[in-house]
Amino acid sequence: MTVTYRYVHGGFAGTNARFSFYFPPRARYRGRFFEPTYPTLGNEDTLQNPPSIGGGPSTLAFVLSHGASMVVSNNAGGVQNSPTLGGYRVNAATAKYSRVVAAKVYGDIARPRGYLFGASGGAYQTVGAAESTSGIWDGFVPMVFGVPNAIPSFMTVQLLALRVLHDKLPQIDDATEPGGSGDPFAGLTSQQRAVLQESARLGFPLRGWWQYATLNGPTR
């Protein structure tokens, strides 16, 4: 996919805080922005950041093609270098200023809606921003918290399901595909049904088993 955008780069005087804005053409713009975050992220150029923390060309293409601008800060060099500003303050200041620049780019527009998201350590930042600010973002998406509970409640149950359901995963996948039966529990033993249900309750989506062949870990 090829997308075009207006790129704006800047920073905040007296700090190491830097930001980048990526604005889609006016015809595509739908009055919103997405802002990724990760605590050790120290580069505001989203094209230089990996997709796992909300960066990279594919993420930018997705954001722009869905009518949103991309808003990225460098966390003032990362939380490790700026614990006071890097937690949520640089993200918040960047989000607020992005609306000022958006008004200059697009003219008389309604207040853009903004959404902050982050995975692992970025989930902490996302929740911290939600708890510590008001009126800056309109939504928050913390993902896969980097907490002790993440191992037993996700990875462990995934490995259990891979071991117990190994021979049944193709039919589970088929049941959830378009045209399938819609019942991934059909044909399973009581133990297999219990394990599949437990993995779903702990956050592994039933439709997520389409990628069973590429999941790593012991299966027997």
Image (cartoon, rainbow, N blue to C red):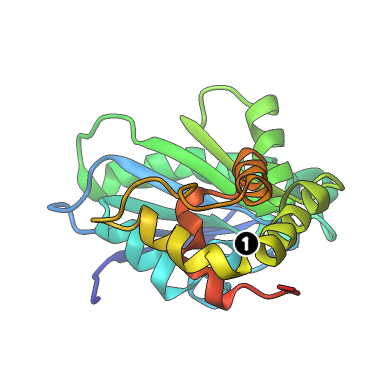
Identified by mark 1, the residue type is Leu
Residue 169 location, x and y as percent? 52, 65
- Which residue is pictured at 75% across the width and 45% down the height? 87
Residue 57 sits in quarter: bottom left
Q: Return the residue at label 1.
A: 165
- Which residue is pictured at 34% across the width and 41% down the height? 32
Count of numbered circles in the view: 1
166 or 130: nearer the viewer: 166
Q: Within 10 Å of the Cα at label 1, are there few (<14), some (14-19), or many (20+) other Cα atoms?
A: many
38 or 82: nearer the viewer: 38
Q: Is residue 15 visible?
A: no
Please tell me whether residue 59 is drawn above or below residue 156 in the rendered image.
below
Please tell me whether residue 60 is drawn above or below residue 98 in the rendered image.
below
143 or 178: nearer the viewer: 178
Circle 1 — which element?
loop
- Which residue is pictured at 31% across the width and 50% down the height? 181
Residue 86 location, x and y as percent? 74, 50
Residue 125 location, x and y as percent? 70, 44
Please tell me whether residue 117 is drawn above or below residue 139 in the rendered image.
below
Q: Quadrant of the C terminus?
A: bottom right
Residue 38 location, x and y as percent? 67, 56
Query: Which residue in the rendered view is the most extreme toward the top?
Result: 134
